[in-house]
Amino acid sequence: MSAVRLALAGAGLIGRRHAEAIAAAKDARLVAVADPTGEAWARERGLPWYADAQALLAAEAPDGLIVATPNQTHVATGLAAVAAGIPALIEKPVADTVAEAARLVEAGRAAGVPLLAGHHRRHNPLIRAAKARIEAGEIGRAVAAQATCWLYKPDAYFAAAPWRTQAGAGPVFINLIHDVDLMRHLVGEVEAVQAADRSAVRGHAVEDTAAAILHFEGGALGTVSVSDTAVAPWSWEMTARENPAYPVTGQSCYQIAGTHGALSLPDGTGWSQAARGWWEPMDARRPGAPDADPLVAQIAHFAAVIRGQAEPLVTAEEGLRSLAVIEAIGRSARTGRVEAVARG
């Protein structure tokens, strides 16, 4: 079976990680790159280079397109792929707004073109195992959850890509959306949020710190907190061993509690009691899960979707639903009120 031919739109940090994942995957190969500033990088790898995705799609006709351009261009690039009849894996957030995401989702649905959202953490064996344990009833009914994403981004990160300081960026859009997506995946849909944010340290047009209360449809409450100006060991990046660029702290950053037990992630420790009660001793178990690069697993899955061998694990519509929670967090931070999560 010949390898699926994938093209890459966007050769920034995440785009290059996708390129590495394609190289590591057994059934895919990178055939072209579109990025207005990525010519040298593409040429060094012997790849055809184009200034934009539209030119690439017209000239190369790849089997699939990975969209890793700046957030503000995801919809236009995704629509170009749909118009060309080419399946696309679109980095999160799939759009700047729920309305734009809905336009993209509907276009893909009408054309019969698969559109996947780049919430790669769902492909991690750690998350697959946690999801199975929760669904098997290990913690009982979920009642509370919390996710922490505290890290420090140096000034060079923003200097290299000034769009990261503008609307459509910020750690809520860039980082917390991953954590919100996993909270939705593991605990359930979010119906409303209450949030606050600050830009007190850097003074950018976007926040540097934010916190939110999530109201889950099933009755659970969750808290999520993000800061890209905090020196701390509690973030998925520094705990899950997904990306070798980040040091590993040995900590966990998620806790999910239920009526019969609790689970911390990514270490996978489950807590329970033989007889429930706050005076009773607790038992811990950690069954473990294999280490694997979820970006490589995501590429393999994308190839299977392109071949018609699998249904998308994380559709663009799923990306829309996580974006709707993020959008509600932004509204609540501005109004100070509990805000309902839109249904796209």
Image: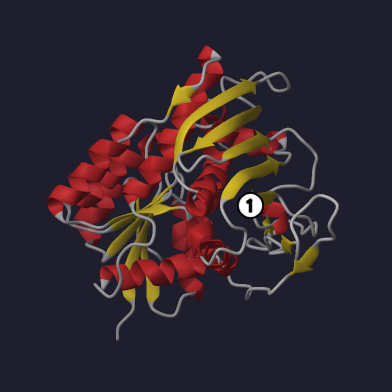
- Identify whether 278 is placed above or below 227: below
Q: Is residue 228 left or right of residue 89?
A: right
Q: Is residue 250 left or right of residue 217?
A: right
- Identify whether 43 is placed above or below 99: below
Residue occupying the far top of the picture: 335
Q: Which residue is mark 1?
A: 259
Q: Position of residue 316 (x, y in %)?
A: 33, 49
Q: Callout 1, which amino acid?
A: Thr
The N terminus: image quadrant: bottom left
Q: Quadrant of residue 199?
A: top right
Q: Which residue corresponds to the image point at 64% horizontal and 29% vertical from the top-left?
A: 211
Q: Position of residue 262 (x, y in %)?
A: 68, 56
The C terminus: image quadrant: top left
Q: Position of residue 4 (x, y in %)?
A: 32, 73
Of residue 16 and residue 266, the one placed in the foreground of this image is 266
Q: Which residue corresponds to the image point at 80% horizontal and 56% vertical from the top-left?
A: 249
Of residue 195 and residue 258, the one placed in the foreground of this image is 258
Q: Position of residue 343 (x, y in %)?
A: 33, 34
Instruction: Give the secondary structure at mark 1.
Output: loop
Label 1 Cα neighbours within 10 Å, binned few <14 / some 14-19 / many ≥20: some
Q: Is residue 174 left or right of residue 342?
A: right
Q: Quadrant of residue 291?
A: bottom right
